[in-house]
Amino acid sequence: MSAPRLNTDRLVEVGVQAEIAHPSHSGTYSVDSYGRPIILPGMAGVVANARVGDLVFPWAADHLEPGVSAGNSQRDRYQALQFLACIGNVVRVLNGPAAGAEGRVTGKHAFVLVDFPQDALDVLAPGDALLVRAVGQGLRFVDFDDVAARSCSPALVEGMGLEARDDGRLRVQVTAEVPAFMMGAGLGMSSEWANCDVMFTRREVVERLGFGDVRLGDVVAMHDQDHRYGRGYRAGMLAFGVVAHGGYGGVPGHGMGVATIFSGPRQRFEIVRSPDANLRNHLDLAD
Amino acid sequence: MATATINDTELLRTALVGDVTSPVLGINPYDVSADGVPFVSVGAGGVCYTVRVGSAADGWAADQVEPGASIANPDAAANEALLLHACVGNRVTVRTGTAAGARGVVTGKHEAFHAYKHVLVHLAPDVLDGLVPGDRLLVHASGRGMTVDGLPELACHSLGPELWEAWAPERAGEQLRLRVTRVLAPEVVGMGSGRVSGATSIALQAGADEALHGLRIGDIVAVRDWDATYYTGYHEDRVTVGVVSTGDSPVLGNGPATTILLSGPAAALDFEIDATANLADLLELA
């Protein structure tokens, strides 16, 4: 076995402008899966006390985006940021008291999600300027033509310890495997855009399906999911992703967000369960 | 068994308007199919002369083709109200243009993420021939607020009293007995999870359930383990019933857009499989 060959030397790295987005609100209540009106934090801005590596669920939050949520107020630049930023990319703070701090892209949702060291998270504010060193769009597994990489940086592939087996399969470590019937909001969208929600909006379902120990940043497998050209159900296909957003929040049809990193036929993969399959380890994130 | 009843004397009839839309495309016109093949999307927006309620849902060179006339209010907030209040079966009157005075019927709703929200209207072929984008249609909206007598746990959405009467659900003890063309597995639902139940559609993904074979636009279908009380999402032991409003899609995670009629506990709903449980038959659409 060896590391899978990539076309890393052909990839272009570009600087993409971003800024920490400010939370916004509709001015009214949403409704959770128990029929209760809710107003819960989680999306946009800076979440300083929930980070990649922490448990997904035990938070009073909806669409909890750990760390920093990076966006761009210009629509076309925002789209470029969404499609060019890849998980594992390096991000630098350009102004404010945390200027110079370095973080890593750890997920995607309505924003690009970035983990920074705790001392930076404590002082970062909406509006602070960021630069994403975007590289990964165009990434290919040279010996796996039928496996499509999506929002996946070469650094992530290396950090994950993927292995190309002699029998032509890719060995992938995951913490959990998601059944197709749980896939919700995010199906039908582009593979690179935001993520796809696993419909964990009720605690009893999290417990029944055994997902209580899943952590933000975990690598998970999604069964019967084809995420090569968009996202949808397809028997015999597999998609892999990283847990990008969490919280017990609860608008039905939403839940734990998983950002796609690659997808291909089931027979091209060997799934290995490992509790250590988390971005905190894979990207060696700073405390 | 007895015919089930609703709070029909409590329901308001209100006037909302929508204009006939025209198709929209980006500067780059290509979408990408599930197999990675680029294509130009055809079928949503404007007037469709070819595909009608009762037609097959698949087999068209199109992406979620909207049968008949597709309308929307040009004011975004007014369009939200149109989408919430127009119900399947409601009568429609053409107000402007050469087809003014013609009558039609609301047959469904169709939402494309971050793009458009349309109400779909059936009109006779000779009326469609005279209809143009911009013509104003009046929807005689009724149904929002509907409850089923004795079954308060059922949530009704986009279900007009006209369709209720034609569908004629029956009451058997503590259950409502509904005619549907098929009962589907929860993994058929693609794009549309997490949406506001009353205003929108959910897509049925091709290949996720063999029971989708032979699906027609206008078919009433049930989805197991799916709730649409407030928003659309997975919920074991609940069932959601909808009506197929558009054709199929080549895009992953998409498929025929299905408008939600009602949702409730599985224990409160019983289904009779009936191939004629289609709007074309029930509402006698010409």
Image: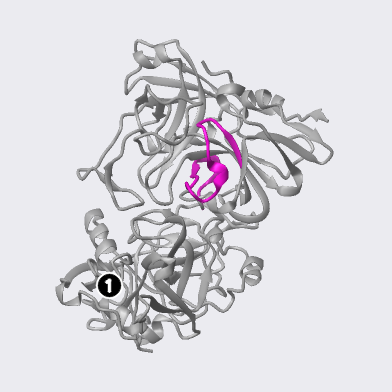
Q: Is residue A49 above or below residue A263?
A: below
Residue at the spot x=39%, y=81% of the render? A279
Element under label 1? loop
Q: Is residue A283 magenta?
A: no
Res B255 → quadrant: top left
Nearer to the camera, A164 or A69: A164
Percent x, y of residue B157: 60, 38
Disc 1: which residue: A141
- Is B89 placed above or below B185 here? above
Q: Tell me the amino acid under the disc marked 1.
A: Phe
Part of the protein shown in magenta: B194-222
> Which image quarter holds the N terminus of chain A?
bottom left
In the depicted structure, whether residue B91 falls above or below residue B249: above
Q: Is residue A191 left or right of residue A33?
A: left
Q: Residue B253 location, x and y as percent? A: 43, 51
Residue pictured at 39% horizontal, 20% vertical: B136
Q: Is residue B207 magenta?
A: yes
- For the C terminus of chain A, the image quarter is bottom left
Residue B106 is at least partly visible in this image: yes
- In the rendered image, residue B209, in percent from the top left (x then y), is placed at 55, 49
Residue found at x 64% / y 72%: A207
